Amino acid sequence: MKKIVVFASGSGSNFEAIQQAILNKKINAKIELVVCDKQKAFVLQRAINHNIESLYVNLKKCGSKEVYEQIIVDKLDEIKPDLICLAGYMKRIDKTILNKYEGKIINIHPALLPSFKGAHGISDAFNYGCRVFGVTVHYVNENFDEGKIIMQRAFEYNGSDINEVEEMIHKIEHVLYVESINKII
Ligand code: GRF
């Protein structure tokens, strides 16, 4: 069975969607670990709820990004994951992790890349006045939000409520991430 590690910093609704797909036998894999950089992130509670191990690493206490990433790499080397899924992980993946795991790391972004990179994809697209929104799943490389695209899904929206857009995007994310994982594994 394939081993998945999820990196997340926040609510973890994408982690939950992946785990539910596993429980419903829509993905033939196991989430071995959740890596998190925020002590209060709800994803940590979700991991407990599913009896999944988590690793919280505090960057400030590590002193440098290299040390921070090395702690994560040591754990990854023990697990030997087939796939690493970034799901709302708010840090850049640097060399220490990439040198060993590039090609196995994917990310989900709430916009149609290469448009609206960065941490505010939804509001940036909305404030631009877009009428088509969407989600991208892509490989992770050294350039933020720039790796090879795996899957994208778009929808038209002509209303004026950003909350509605956000809701539609998250709904798509939870389906598209599962489809993308299956495409790879
Ligand atoms: C998602 O919108 C994802 O596309 C972005 O961060 C958000 C994470 O949401 N990278 P959640 O923590 O999975 O609920």
Image (cartoon, rainbow, N blue to C red):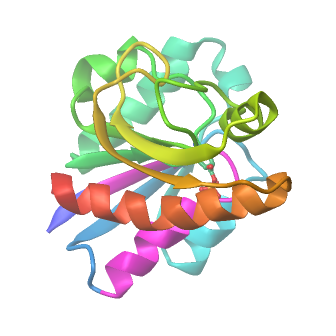
| 73 left or right of 112 in image | left
Residue 171 position in % (x across, y down)? 57, 67
Tell me if I can see residue 22 in this picture.
Answer: yes
| Residue lying furthest bottom | 24
Is residue 68 shown in magenta?
Answer: no
Which of these two is toward me, 178 or 132? 132
Compared to residue 131, the image places residue 97 above or below, namely above
- The range drawn in magenta is 4-24
Q: In the rendered view, would you say 137 is above or below 60? A: below
Quadrant of the rendered structure where residue 115 is?
top right
* Residue at x-position 37% and y-position 16%: 96
Q: Position of residue 37 (x, y in %)?
A: 64, 39
Quadrant of residue 12 within the rendered picture: bottom right
Count numbered badges in the picture: 0
**Up-down relation of residue 176 to residue 71 (above or below):** below
Rendered residue at 37%/77% (across/down): 21
21 within the magenta span: yes
Q: Residue at x 61, y 57 (%)?
A: 169
**Along the line of sight, the residue nearer the viewer: 147 or 52:** 147
Identity of the residue furthest to the front in this view: 158
Q: Could you tell me residue 76's position as x and y percent? A: 32, 41
Which quadrant, please, contains the C terminus? bottom left
- Judged left or right of residue 33, residue 179 is left
Residue 52 visible, this angle: no
> 121 or 77, which is in the foreground?
121
State which quarter of the image contains the N terminus. Answer: bottom left
